[in-house]
Image: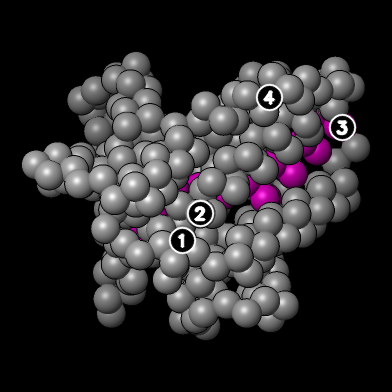
């Protein structure tokens, strides 16, 4: 019952965001500004504070980091394989590849992890975020640059990755922890600000929903949804057998790899003039189906 309520809580925030859009309570520009706050301030603070006062020696596991890196690589290869079967157009193939392997686990995964396992789970999630920011951004840009230009400026790309707010948040959290810095009166307000990330992030997600119907996209959307929401957590689960991981590490990883398509996949499609309607459908419908699939995945766990 607790699991069901957690999922319904997520859905409620998304529905509220969509209702606010329909009644025009705040504009798209306001939603974009709020989204910047969520990803540049609130979520990084949430990650930073998850490291505060924790013994990292009891948390950081080299096997876990190796597992995450390998699983990202396997899911990327799987996504590329599925996309090649679906499309001949390189740009459309990039849209589908990114939609499969790039997950929205910051907005959709963090609230579930914190509800089920407590704030300590965000440390593991933070490690996954650190790896994902490097992997996601480099591979996504590589896919689109290869499809449109045939070359990639990796040096510039890597510098941009290092400036990602979530990655900076992970590094700051580790530094504060290792140096034993006492935040004193700042601890409570920083923690409180960090906690606003999930509700605001979910509301903005719902506000951005645009429902379209294109019968030509149905097949692709169903294939990508199945690949993203069922196959990826299955791959994550099977890969855990190769490593010495705790039950908590396994659970966190499977939950995060089972999250819906990341919103940024639509942004990339738009920037590279790819099929934005298809990219939008992937984000919207994997998010809707996620309420069912994550429940099934967690029941298996």
Mark 4, residue position: 157
**Callout 2: few (<14), some (14-19), or many (20+) C-alpha neighbours within 10 Å?**
some
Q: Report, in whole angstroms, how far the alpha carbon at label 3 lies from the one at label 2.
A: 35 Å
Secondary structure mostly seen in magenta is helix
Q: Report, in whole angstroms, how far the alpha carbon at label 4 lies from the one at label 1.
A: 25 Å
- Whether 94 is among the magenta residues is yes
Q: In the image shown, does 295 or 59 lie closer to the viewer?
A: 59
Q: Which mark is residue 89?
A: 3
Question: Reading the chain from its start, which is encountered first: label 3 or label 1?
Answer: 3
Residue 31: percent from left, percent from top: 33, 25
**Callout 4: few (<14), some (14-19), or many (20+) C-alpha neighbours within 10 Å?**
some
Residue 115: percent from left, percent from top: 29, 66
Q: Secondary structure at mark 1?
A: helix
- Magenta-tinted stretch: 89-113
Mark 2, residue position: 127
Residue 206: percent from left, percent from top: 36, 40
Residue name at image x 54 percent, y 74 percent:
250
Cβ atoms at labels 2 and 1 below 8 Å apart: yes
- Coloring basis for residues: one colour
Q: Quadrant of residue 189?
A: top left
Please indicate whether residue 60 sits to the left or right of residue 93 in the image.
Answer: left
Q: Nearer the viewer, mark 4 or mark 3?
A: 4
Q: Secondary structure at mark 2?
A: helix
Question: Reading the chain from its start, which is encountered first: label 4 or label 3?
Answer: 3
Mark 1, residue position: 124
Residue name at image x 72 percent, y 29 percent:
141
């Amino acid at each position: 019952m607790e699991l069901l309520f957690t999922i319904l809580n997520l859905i409620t925030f998304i529905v509220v965001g969509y209702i606010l859009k329909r009644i025009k309570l705040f504009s798209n520009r306001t939603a974009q500004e709020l989204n910047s706050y969520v990803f540049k301030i609130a979520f990084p603070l949430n990650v930073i504070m998850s490291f505060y006062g924790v013994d990292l020696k009891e948390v950081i596991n080299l096997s876990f980091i190796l597992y995450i890196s390998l699983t990202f690589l396997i899911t990327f290869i799987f996504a590329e394989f599925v996309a090649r079967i679906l499309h001949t157009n390189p740009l459309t193939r990039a849209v589908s590849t990114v939609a499969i392997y790039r997950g929205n686990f910051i907005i959709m995964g963090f609230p579930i992890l914190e509800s089920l396992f407590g704030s300590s789970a965000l440390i593991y999630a933070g490690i996954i975020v650190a790896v994902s920011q490097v992997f996601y951004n480099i591979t996504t840009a590589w896919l689109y640059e290869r499809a449109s230009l045939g070359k990639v400026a990796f040096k510039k790309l890597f510098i941009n990755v290092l400036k990602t707010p979530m990655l900076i948040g992970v590094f700051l959290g580790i530094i504060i922890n290792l140096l034993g810095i006492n935040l004193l009166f700042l601890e409570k307000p920083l923690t409180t600000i960090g906690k606003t990330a999930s509700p605001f992030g979910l509301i903005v997600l719902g506000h951005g929903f645009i429902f379209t119907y294109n019968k030509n996209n149905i097949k692709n959307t169903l294939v990508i949804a199945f690949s993203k929401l069922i196959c990826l957590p299955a791959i994550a689960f099977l890969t855990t057998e190769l490593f010495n991981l705790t039950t908590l590490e396994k659970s966190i990883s499977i939950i995060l790899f089972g999250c819906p398509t990341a919103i940024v996949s639509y942004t990339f499609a738009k920037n590279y003039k790819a099929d934005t309607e298809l990219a939008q459908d992937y984000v919207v419908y994997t998010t809707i189906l996620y309420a069912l699939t994550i429940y099934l995945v967690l029941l298996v766990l």
